[in-house]
Image (spheres, rainbow, N blue to C red):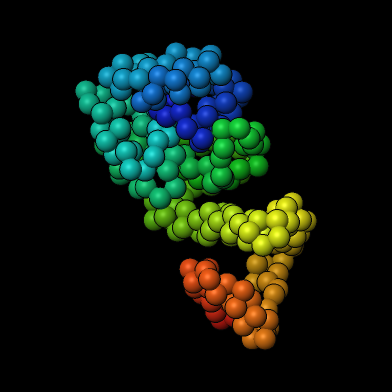
Amino acid sequence: MKIVLIGAGNLATNIGKALAGRGHDLLQVYSRTAESAERLAALLHSDYTTSLSEVKDEADLYLVAVKDSVLADVAEQLAKGHPDRFLVHTAGSMPMETLPTRRKGVLYPMQTFSKEREVDFREIPCFIEASNAEDAEQLRALAQTLSDKVYEANSEQRKYLHLAAVFCCNFVNHCYALSEKLLKENGGLPFDVMLPLIDETARKVHELSPREAQTGPAVRWDTNVMEKQLQLLEDKPELQDIYKALSKSIHLMT
């Protein structure tokens, strides 16, 4: 399939490399900054541009992987004079109708991406939506070249999917960062000591439900331990609030 990639960030970089590796023709990369566009285009052996008005017109599909805050504006510019372009965005929390063209769709790979880390797209769940049956079939065929786990999800379902992913990934990673900071500020133990615990916690939910896998003082409502730990955070009221809120939530669910 002939594809123009709009964006050169973490997701665009990873999905662009995956698409090129599956034999798709990445005609062009667009980014606001020439350095980002040129760097990704070199990896994909494609042309690049920093102007939406110079985007090539012969692509089968325009994959828009940009920040949510600029998606509507970018899509509007891509659609000017080209109402039949097949625009497909990659955002989890944005509705398909954000795209103003007649042919539109969503390809949302639910994963955390960094430019520096290779990911196996075969293992990544990809959620698709399209405005008509023919384009849905085309989008499904494209997604299946990337992933073995392709699902249909409408915009309403995808909003909650993205919300669940924020809890599962972003909030959890923030807790890692808080853990690292606590260790560094109180004796300087390396964060590496947490990795076996993190790995086992993640492995457990492959076999148990998250609710069944939950352990710790909040499950038992061990106020003796909890009060002592809150005292350790007495100079960090924002962390006390997080500790209390999470502990209450854990206890209410068990």
- Lateral position of residue 33 relative to residue 20, left or right: left
Q: Is residue 32 left or right of residue 46?
A: left
Counting from the top left corner in percent of width and height, residue 72 is at 29, 39
**Nearer-the-camera pick, 197 or 63:** 197
Image quarter (top left, top right, bottom left or bottom right) of the C terminus: bottom right
| Residue at screen point 27% across, 19% down | 53
Q: Residue at the location (37% across, 43% down)? A: 68
**Does 5 sit left or right of 110 as displayed?**
left
Q: Quadrant of residue 208?
A: bottom right
Compared to residue 53, the image places residue 122 above or below, namely: below
Q: Is residue 203 above or below residue 5?
A: below
Image quarter for residue 206?
bottom right
Query: Which of these two is toward me, 49 or 23?
Result: 49
Asked if residue 106 can be seen in this view, the reply is no
Q: How far across and down, in percent of the image, does residue 65 sit? A: 43, 34
The image quadrant that residue 87 belongs to is top left
* Residue at image coords 61%, 23%: 21
